[in-house]
Image (cartoon, grey):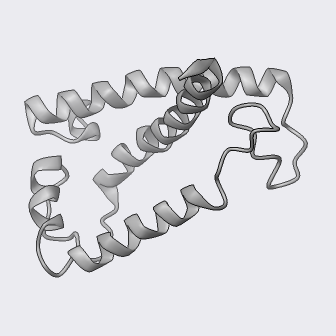
Amino acid sequence: AGFRNLRAAEIKHGRVAMMASIGLPFNHYVHMPGWEKAANTFKSQYKVATTFEIAPYLFVFWASILLLELSFWKQDAEKEAGNFGDPFGVGMYTRDMRDKELNNGRFAMFATTGIIAAQYFTNKDAIQQLGL
């Protein structure tokens, strides 16, 4: 696998976990269209996701992700792992910011795992676990 591939995977998983650690609490307050019937737990969302009315949307979603992964977000062998440039042109792609992203991604992976595990065992979403 090599260090470069492992680092690229760590950065990608960290980025996904950072989005998930925000999305899981956000899901308590906002429901996407078609998901109104589901509660905020994974079990109930899985039941709704496997219904015929939602399945075509999920297929389009996953196909879009696959397309992005294979085209726009493909890792360039000439660049360091996880480097996709500065898409917003804010000039923050420095060594310090890359280190912060890596550390925050590592923390988010643990946080997301904790939220998901607690949700599985308690049947409470991320906000309900806090007693709010």
Taking depth in this image into account, of 71 and 113 the one nearest to the observer is 71
Q: Splitting the image into 4 quarters, where does residue 81 fall?
A: top right
Q: Residue at x 38, y 51 (%)?
A: 26
Q: In this view, does 116 lie to the left or right of 26?
A: left
Q: In which quarter of the image is residue 46?
A: bottom left
Q: Residue at x 47, y 61 (%)?
A: 66
In the rendered view, tell whether residue 109 sits above or below residue 24.
Answer: above
Relative to 132, 101 lies left or right? right
User: Relative to 91, does residue 58 appear above or below in the rendering?
Assistant: below
Q: In this view, does 23 lie to the left or right of 29?
A: right
Question: Residue 120 or 49: which is nearer the viewer?
Answer: 49
Q: How many numbered marks are there?
A: 0
Residue located at (35% from left, 44% from top)? 25
- The x, y position of residue 76, in whole percent, is 74, 44
Report the residue that reaches farthest toward the front. Answer: 1
Residue 37 located left or right of residue 24: left
Residue 77 x/y as whole percent: 75, 39
Residue 43 x/y as whole percent: 10, 49
Position of the C terminus by quadrant: top left
* Closest to the observer, 132 or 86: 86
Looking at the image, residue 58 lies above or below residue 23: below
- Residue drawn at x 61%, y 31% as measured from the top left: 8
Residue 83 in the image: state x and y as whole percent.
Answer: 75, 39
